[in-house]
Image: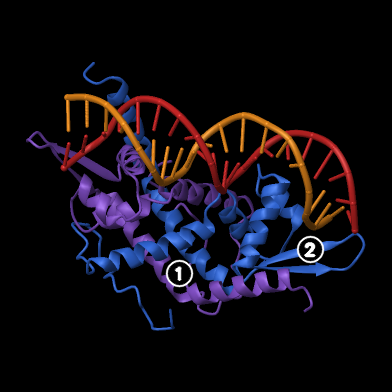
Chain colours: A purple, B blue, C orange, D red
Amino acid sequence: MSQRNSAVTVKVRAVEAPAEVPDAGSDDHERTACTVLQVLERVSGKWAIGILLECAHGPRRFTELERAVRGISRRMLTLTLRNLERDGLLTRTVYPTVPPKVEYTATPMALELYESLVTLAKWAERHRSSIADARVEYDRSAVDPVA
Amino acid sequence: MSQRNSAVTVKVRAVEAPAEVPDAGSDDHERTACTVLQVLERVSGKWAIGILLECAHGPRRFTELERAVRGISRRMLTLTLRNLERDGLLTRTVYPTVPPKVEYTATPMALELYESLVTLAKWAERHRSSIADARVEYDRSAVDPVA
DNA sequence: CCGTATCCGACCGGATACTG
DNA sequence: CAGTATCCGGTCGGATACGG
């Protein structure tokens, strides 16, 4: 896909009191869905975002990430790192010293993505309790149909 | 977490020519990462976004979704629908007619999320080709170390 | 029309052990 | 320090068949 500006076509802006999205033209949804899906797939897996968020604040070494992204295994750290590098979101720099030193740095592209992740984080923050409530309510009425 | 406004703390805005994210205070990353992770987990799975995007443009029936979200199986449609309903992102309305009719509608919360997804979609659109290039380049030099 | 139930393969991801 | 290799269980998700 070329560099055509704002190729996404959907109307954004001003959904303060959301009623209904204006519509965007039927199979445009599909193109958008596909695109978003591809983003989410790159960034999916439990660990990619944690790593990206860490590296957004400066170069990080392998072991630093292993400690910062808590709960991650060596294996998953390596795999996720490789994928992020492959997609051009992280650059890997090896310093041929002894002991070896490797730094992972977020690319400009990744730093832009970081912006979107912050947007997402804000949404999550706003609705976290609503979602939690919805869950307990749903589970309650599922287990306890009429009570 | 209560309703404190802008609890995310990280500095946003103005990363036109991204150099480095200012930093946000060490373990604030973790809280942000966790939050974002939770969002992504709700919305992950290949199908949730496609469904959300469809329903953002008005109520949709089960079979309509089955056709619109192409490639989805009945099973996955049902499961994803249930999870989205459980999280309060979709409301399920049953019309006790014959034959039965069920409508799924995006909640205001989901329509706000839609905004974020559009942001993500824009990012993906901007960088789609860069990522594709990065991949072929990475794969090339992996298979073809020195040539 | 709108689902649920069952089977089953693919892959994600943790634990552990070994290497340059 | 910064990985790689192997094993192995759990979950995701497709295909198919059946039910209200």
**Relative side of B2 to B138, left or right:** right
> Share a chain, discs 2 and 1?
no
Taking the spot 41% from the left edge, 66% from the top edge, the residue there is B35
As drawn, A133 above or below B90 = below
Q: Please identify the quarter of the rendering in which residue B106 is found.
A: bottom right
Badge 2 is on which residue? B102
Q: Chain of mark 1?
A: A
Q: Mark 1: which amino acid?
A: Ala
Residue at the outermost top position: B147
Residue linked to disc 1: A124
Labels 2, 1: front one: 1
Is A142 situated left or right of A35 in this image? Answer: right
Q: Is residue A10 above or below residue A97?
A: below
**Relative image position of residue A40 (x, y in whole percent):** 46, 50
Residue A20 point in image, percent of width and height: 61, 71
- A31 or D16, which is in the foreground? D16
Compared to residue B21, the image places residue A98 above or below, namely above
Q: Quadrant of the N terminus of chain A?
A: top left
Residue A30's tag is none
Q: Check disc 2 and report its element: helix, strand or loop.
A: strand
Residue in the picture at 23% in, 68% down: B24
Task: Using a 10 Å C-alpha cutoff, classify the residue at mark 2 as few (fewer than 14 neighbours), some (14 to 19) or many (20 or more).
Answer: some
Identify the amino acid type marked 2: Val
The residue lying at 48 percent from left, 73 percent from top is: A128
Q: CA distance from mark 2 to mark 1?
A: 28 Å
> For residue D5, what is the image quadrant?
top left
Q: Position of residue B53 (x, y in %)?
A: 59, 58
